[in-house]
Image: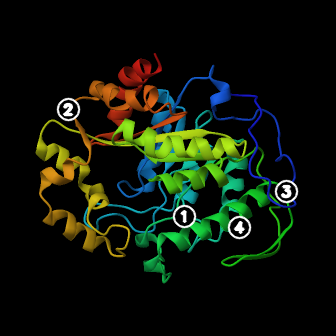
Amino acid sequence: MLLGSYPARPAWPGRPSALIRSGQCLVLKSPENQGDRVKFAWLCSHEAYQPEELVEQAVAAEEAGFDVVLGSDHFHPWVDDNSAAGFVWTWLGTVAARTRRVQLGTSVTCPLFHYHPGLIAQAAATVDRLSGGRFLLGAGTGEAINERPLGFDFPPYRERQDRMREALEIMHRLFAGEKLTFDGTYYRTDSARLYSPPLHQVPVLMAAGGPKSAAFAGQFADGLITSVKDPQDTVANIIEPYRRAAAERGGSQLVMATRWTVLGGSEDEFWQALSPMRGLRAPGRLEAADPAELRFRADEMDRADVLGNYACISEPAALVEAYRPLVHDVGADIVSIQVCTADPIATIAEIGAEVLPKLRS
């Protein structure tokens, strides 16, 4: 996936036809690039581990043969008793300095409230420069747990999507090198410009969980991020609407498929491994501001109901069957391996030795 051209993005008014290029450009695989292999990502969960631990996970992932290292972006975690919440953008700078090969990205950042989209464009461009052009930006419409603690409202999805349309335009145009004066419904800029622009094109992939948001990603973003539970359902309701919308505008059709798995030998071990993330499936998770509230709701649920939302795996080798459908059935360009485990460094090494070779074959 080196040394290639990148499919066209939306033609924003006044937008130059190409972004800044320099040296070897990392280009994600698209349907036009079928000879390239699928990339495999390791997610560094900032809700579960302290940032210094996640730096070591990122280094271990590169050594184990992963192609991409992703970081989640949270102000608050999902629970308050066994968790963390480091600042992903500081962490990315450190990881850029400690790695040489892996692509880096966010999964995902919300550029709508406590971040202005222009600030995220600046942050992404900076990481791209520090990493030698290895950055991709994963974006989403967010959760209240990252906005309300800082005094921001968290409006219904319709407004968040409208905000995202403006945010994507601002980021794309700044990446393109414009000096941008923008007067939108939600955001304004006055002669804004990236004076430390990205070295390479920074693809913006948008998270989507339904057909409308998938079609929106196809219209306005450079790629799609989607979490897979049932591969056939994902293809019918997410991938196909996304590809149709992207094809209609002649854009890229990049897909990152993600899946959470839990590694352990018993229900108690599964629960312990999942502990920092157990609030992720609690009722009302998109509206809650306090991780203590989500912890309480999660612990009120039956453990089997919580664990039933995840693929619970007894040994790393079994991860092959958990992630193979994302390669063959979903047809993802990037497969994000997201594992709750008691020993992430050992798990990363085992996946590199036992799982990635089989998934690549």
Against 122, residue 309 (above or below) is: above
In the rendered structure, which disc, 3 or 2, sits on the residue that comes first in sequence? 3
The amino acid type, in three-letter code, at marker 1 is Cys
Decide if residue 135 is in sight here.
no
Against 120, residue 94 (above or below) is: above
Mark 1 is surrounded, within 10 Å at the Cα level, by few (under 14), some (14 to 19) or many (20 or more) other residues, namely many
Q: Where is residue 311 in the image (x, y as percent from the top left)?
A: 26, 39
Q: In which quarter of the image is residue 111?
A: bottom right
In the rendered structure, which disc, 2 or 1, sits on the residue that comes first in sequence? 1
Q: Which of marks 2 and 1 is in front?
A: 1
In the rendered structure, which disc, 4 or 1, sits on the residue that comes first in sequence? 1
Q: How far apart are marks 4 and 1 (CA)?
A: 12 Å
Q: Nearer the viewer, mark 4 or mark 3?
A: 3
Which numbered marker is on residue 118? 4
- Look at mark 3 in the image and give the residue it sits on: 15
- Look at mark 2 in the image and give the residue it sits on: 314
The amino acid type, in three-letter code, at marker 4 is Gly
Q: How far apart are marks 4 and 2 (CA)?
A: 44 Å
Secondary structure category for the residue under label 3:
loop
- Look at mark 1 in the image and give the residue it sits on: 110
Along the viewing direction, whichever of 357 and 64 lies nearer the viewer: 357
In the rendered structure, which disc, 4 or 3, sits on the residue that comes first in sequence? 3
